[in-house]
Image: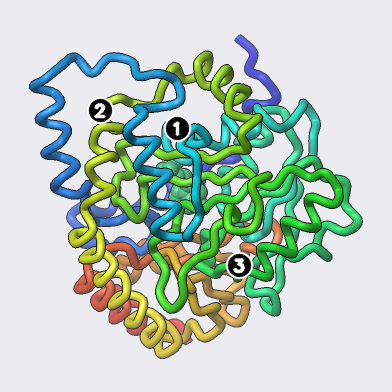
Amino acid sequence: MRTSRRSEVDPFIVMDVMEAARAAESAGRHIIHMEVGQPGTGAPQAAVRALSAAMEEGPLGYTVALGLPALRTRIAQLYGAWYNVDLDPDRVIVTSGASGGFILAFNALFDSGDRVGIGAPGYPSYRQILAGLGFQPVDLPTTDANRLQPVPADFADIDLAGLLVASPGNPTGTMLDRSAMSDLIEAADARDISFISDEIYHGIEYERRAVSALEVSDDVYVINSFSKYFSMTGWRVGWMVVPPDHVRVVERIAQNMFICAPHASQVAALAAMDAHDELQGNMDVYRANRALMLEGLPKAGFTHIAPPDGAFYVYADVSDITHDSRALAAEILDKADVAITPGLDFDPVRGHTTLRFSYARKTEDISEGLRRLSDFMAKHR
Ligand SMILES: Cc1ncc(COP(=O)(O)O)c(C=O)c1O
């Protein structure tokens, strides 16, 4: 049977790295995981307790497509607490992770063939989801001077239906400050370009807080998730905030495509939102890990890095070491037992000279990983 042309999307290379690391582990080797983009911790205890109580109480059938009303209300409150934004809960839509949010947002906003700008380097699945749905992803190469985030000049001459940004970004962890965010939203607005802000790493920020696109405008789509700050990757629950007149549009698509986000995960997510102390405990670990990375990576020989404002990644330019990041990552896994991600996932053009290091795991793993990287580089040079 033939397969469609639209199904010919690229693999997610980090998944291949994870598989190589798993194979090494099953051969008895001890691998330090700096490839995975997920917390080493599970869902907050309160989330697990709430779910087990709910499972005793009832069948956890479908919820309404837009999500449990109590969860939508609680998410709206978060915008008051984090950004001082007064948000109507009716504008909040609970999704199957940020990934489910992208599918809903792209389908609600774009027609077949529409071009959507994404910063490069950027989260690989933007490109693949857009292409798989029949839209055209347009990479906007970013620069060190703009801390690897797009600016209006990057799409001034390009015809776009949409612009998707992420702050803090993956793989860089760099953020758009308020004026950079406003400039992008204004430039998009002036040309009727739909603006989507991926805010999945909000809450995981170090020296200043991340700015939400909703602080600047109501005429934007904001996508967020319980995967990162709330430490619930496998639960597949997230949310989206859309302009009031788009709620019904997205609801109709959500009803048909997903029916609803997983009910059990919605119950757990609601409780997770009050697990402040436990979540701040996770933040203490990321903060310590970040400090170790910012000191240890340059010492090991990875000198060209953009200090991350948020998330749990460091993106390094390794053009002085290699022009084949995939081979270098494979060699580091093979010889140093450290799994890292080659930049090609994030930037198909320039990623052959970059690597992404994740520091989401335990601090002792980060120390050990840095020691191994240092030894490897000493022999490599
Ligand atoms: C920038 C970014 N957006 C979205 C996602 C997908 O998140 P979710 O687990 O909520 O689908 C990821 C996952 O790593 C990410 O890094």
The reply to whether residue 228 is in sight is yes
What is the C-alpha distance between the residues marked 2 and 1? 13 Å
Q: In this image, 29 relative to 97: left or right?
A: left
Q: Are marks 2 and 1 in contact (CB under 8 Å)?
A: no
Q: Which mark is residue 264?
A: 2
The local secondary structure at tag 3 comes to loop
Q: Which residue is mark 3?
A: 176
Q: Which mark is residue 159?
A: none
Residue located 79% across and 63% down the image? 152
Q: Mark 2: few, some, or many residues within 10 Å (few <14, many ≥20)?
A: many
Q: In this rendering, is residue 276 above or below 133?
A: below
Q: Residue at label 1?
A: 95
- Residue furthest to the bottom in view is 299
- Describe the element under mark 2 as helix, strand or loop: helix
Rendered image quadrant of residue 181: bottom right
| Residue in view at x 68 percent, y 70 percent | 179
